[in-house]
Image: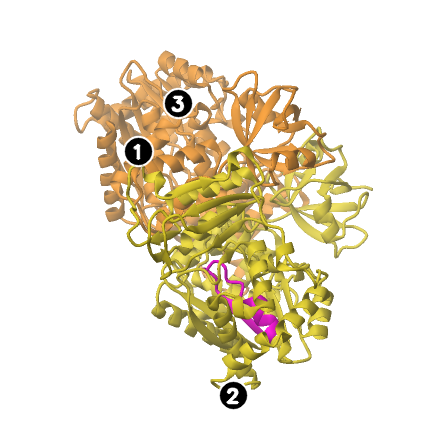
Chain colours: A orange, B yellow
Amino acid sequence: MRGKDRLRISLKDFEYDEKIAIINKIDADKLEVKSGDKISITNLKNKNIKSIFTVALSNDLINEGEIIIPSSHAEKLGFKNGDIVKIAQTHKPESIELIKKKIAGEKLEKGEIRTIINEIVDGLLGKTEIMGFIMAQKYIGMDMDEIEALTRAMVDTGEKIEFRRPTYDKHSIGGVPGNKVSLLIVPIIASAGLLIPKTSSRAITSPSGTADTMEVLANVNLTLEEFMDVANKVGGALIWGGALNLAPADDIIINAEKTLRLDPIPQMLASIMAKKMAAGIKTMVLDIPVGKETKMENIDDAMNFARLVIELGNRLGIRVQAGITYGEQPVGHNVGPALEAKEALEALINPKDSPASLIEKSCSLAGLLLEMSGKAPIGMGHKLAKDILYSGKAYQKMKEIIEAQGGNPNIKPDEIPVGQYKYEVYAPVDGFITKVSNSSIIQIARAAGAPKEKGAGIILHVKRGRKVTAGQKILEVYAERSVKLQDAVHVLESNPPVIIEGMLLKTVPERTIYTMQSESYSQGSNSE
Amino acid sequence: MRGKDRLRISLKDFEYDEKIAIINKIDADKLEVKSGDKISITNLKNKNIKSIFTVALSNDLINEGEIIIPSSHAEKLGFKNGDIVKIAQTHKPESIELIKKKIAGEKLEKGEIRTIINEIVDGLLGKTEIMGFIMAQKYIGMDMDEIEALTRAMVDTGEKIEFRRPTYDKHSIGGVPGNKVSLLIVPIIASAGLLIPKTSSRAITSPSGTADTMEVLANVNLTLEEFMDVANKVGGALIWGGALNLAPADDIIINAEKTLRLDPIPQMLASIMAKKMAAGIKTMVLDIPVGKETKMENIDDAMNFARLVIELGNRLGIRVQAGITYGEQPVGHNVGPALEAKEALEALINPKDSPASLIEKSCSLAGLLLEMSGKAPIGMGHKLAKDILYSGKAYQKMKEIIEAQGGNPNIKPDEIPVGQYKYEVYAPVDGFITKVSNSSIIQIARAAGAPKEKGAGIILHVKRGRKVTAGQKILEVYAERSVKLQDAVHVLESNPPVIIEGMLLKTVPERTIYTMQSESYSQGSNSE
């Protein structure tokens, strides 16, 4: 080992939100790096093993001549304990000036957008710079040339999948809690003999993304080979796209924007289509929920978004049909990963006793795909989808998918564990439900711990228009931890999720809008 | 020690950009905290010693029952090795929804702004959330009620100083490189018998803030008591405000926005006035440089900003006079902390041989303060300031200030060390200088390492309108590290800092606009 830029890896268990490597201050001085600088680390035995880390300094935790690399990163990257690595300073990212250009309102060139995405994927940009780029997209916008360039750059910085058969997909722009329809649509489409290899994101703005929900039933962290095997074998799969390194910029961007739940239109378009293009999808239906408190407030916005996504699809060689759906209250009754997985499984097993909103939406969107594929004549897709669901074929297909993805195909809905801390809300008066608030339900479910904590969520016992009587249970909140249930109740008290006509909204004290029947959550008892 | 929420502090040398505490995974499970969560840590012996840290997890670096607190933070906060601390989860910050409200374009109430600032100061918000708030201020804006609330909240979350005598101050909104005028104005005003206890920020957008420049000559990290002692004793001080805990939110916000060099008007106003109000300033002159590539592109913008700051001053009880100054090229010749300190000292010692731009600007702004104080009749302030400077009194006063702040009062300008790596630029043609670009000079100096690396910067041998002959030296770039000099030269090649009439701007290859006479910086030789 020679040269001041050579260090020996000391693998240590160290988990943090950012990719940190720890070096001794003596080495830092020799290398002329400071705490917070980005460094590139190259394995001398195999120069393809190379990655950028942010430097932390310590004389107490690491010896001179050594570098702590967190084991979790090392495992993914291929660094081993004792490996000799070369450390190099990184230069100032070019993207800083490009992002400033966008913030100032200018259009970015194709190559400039590519530079930003390359530097994001290389780990050269921090979360604040990425936030700057996202906020500029929100307020300044991007034209279709920029969005296409953004999408292609995101595709080109990751893996690309090619299937031998035509591929179908369904995607939702999100914004509606409880939207577990993919867990019905994928097995319906696969049952019809079409290939539907669905990759999805984890939740950004909702209490559970399709990947979060499916993860309750099966492994969603498949390798590229495993994913293709499952899809080719059973005709469908439901996995988290993040593990495949498809458009990896997307996950990094989501990580930066997630706390504030931002999702500007250009990034939303690029994010959806880059994942689809990289996954080799050729035909897709896009679910655009519309309504107050969803991402699209009205039909005009939804139509406009639909036109944009169809135009972007055209430019990228992907056939897109958009389904504009009602989004002003949750789909079905359950919200949160475990609760949604449970409801989806119940609907596959016993569709006739399941919520109409879930069954009808799933069959409508599946129907569009069946029509685009030619499996059903125009206008007959919905009926074919429903026939497949009611025949039990979709449930059988789902069991095949669950099994192929390493889950238990025979799991019963009741066997799915949900949070042990529960809080119940009762109707204070007789009356009709005039509003179910998505944003309140999302905030409550997320405060309860969803999607990170699978068992957290909400069961909504009533929907808009339903008549209730005073004292009737209208809602349950579930959490895995007492502190989270308290948070959720705190949110619930100031954001009523359900409004009953005739209910006093502004009594004094304001916090007693509901008759709360707490099941002693503060003592941490198990109320299930 | 009992209770799963009690841990024993293990102080370790650990430097990183964020405030991290490291705990064992077994404790994390018991405490129900995950990597990246914020926790509050309270010393059981003294419950006033309490702070919020972000959690990193490790089984290798820390034993069960212990918690690593970085020594640097512990020192400031008062935590000692072996102290038993109580760990508590923090609840979701309320500010998230408030920042989202601002992002959506709504006005924030006084109390809402206070909540955001409280949570920023408490360490509950991450950099991305703060960036969201800043970007919303940029694109949505804030009205005067919001700005006043922001300013007062920033003042109230920190220390407040009261002087027994009337206090004067000078502040620049920045944007012009080389603006070392405070190092002349403070001693001039103090020489006139007025109290000018100047606190300043470190550079946000420029290659050197007043605090960065002064730090070359003396200690600027004074405690509150030391600062007041110096000011009361010699009548003036030039220190970094960040060490005093005046409006501490400001430094946290600057830390989040610095990479992209953002500084939206509402935050700029609140930042300036909160520091001044907290520092007990009653009368001030504000330097507003105007011109292309400064913060104020034209006189209208500057006038508008001046009106806003005067109105905000009125609301806060601070008399403000604004001086709108020419800002289209650097003040004086030198840019970067050490080079600027050198030039300021030269001007105090020998004003008649110093650049007119530096002397005139300093005396004009000092003159306004002398008039506001009644020391000079209206219209006579500039003359009085110049008399004081030329009499040598200001230099004597500066020596007193340097000495009182622990510096060497007898330091000669030539004794100030500058970067050992140098790159010289020569005029390629005969002609008149038609442009000196601030933004290029800022980018070059920052790429060279300024302000972090004190010796980095630029000496500009020519100014706008000056006639040069081919081969004449027009510019020198200094850096402390070869890699930084390379970065600076890279920036310089694509952003010419000086334009000579008749100079070919678009020759092929584009990179040879200048005749470069590199002093072998890539071999790392000492060219000084």
| Chain of the residue displaying label 1 | A
- Checking the image for residue B377, the label placed there is 2
The amino acid type found where label 3 is placed reads Glu
**Could you give the CA–CA distance between mark 1 and mark 2, rounded to whole angstroms?**
84 Å
Q: Earlier in the sequence, mark 1 or mark 3?
A: 3
In the image, B440: left or right of A446?
left
In the image, A289: left or right of A523?
left
In the image, B17: left or right of B175?
right
Vertical order, A437 against A387 (above or below)? below
At mark 2, the secondary structure is: loop
**Could you give the CA–CA distance between mark 1 and mark 3, rounded to whole angstroms?**
35 Å
Q: Residue at x 76, y 37 (%)?
A: B66
Residue underneath mark 3: A159
At mark 1, the secondary structure is: helix
- Of tags 2 and 3, the one toward the viewer is 2
Q: Position of residue B170 (x, y in %)?
A: 54, 71
Residue underneath mark 1: A360
At mark 3, the secondary structure is: loop
Task: Please report the bounds of the magenta region as a residue range.
Answer: B168-188
Q: Position of residue B317 (x, y in %)?
A: 55, 78
The amino acid type found where label 1 is placed reads Glu
Q: Residue at x 44, y 35 (%)?
A: A120
In the image, B243: left or right of B523?
right
Q: Nearer the viewer, residue B63 or A484?
A: B63
- Of tags 1 and 3, the one toward the viewer is 3
**Could you give the CA–CA distance between mark 2 and mark 3, rounded to whole angstroms?**
74 Å
Instruction: Choose top left, top right, bottom left or bottom right for residue A82.
Output: top right
Examine the structure image and report whether residue B182 is included in the region drawn in magenta. Answer: yes
| Chain of the residue displaying label 2 | B
Q: Residue at x 34, y 32 (%)?
A: A153
Q: Is residue A503 visible?
A: yes
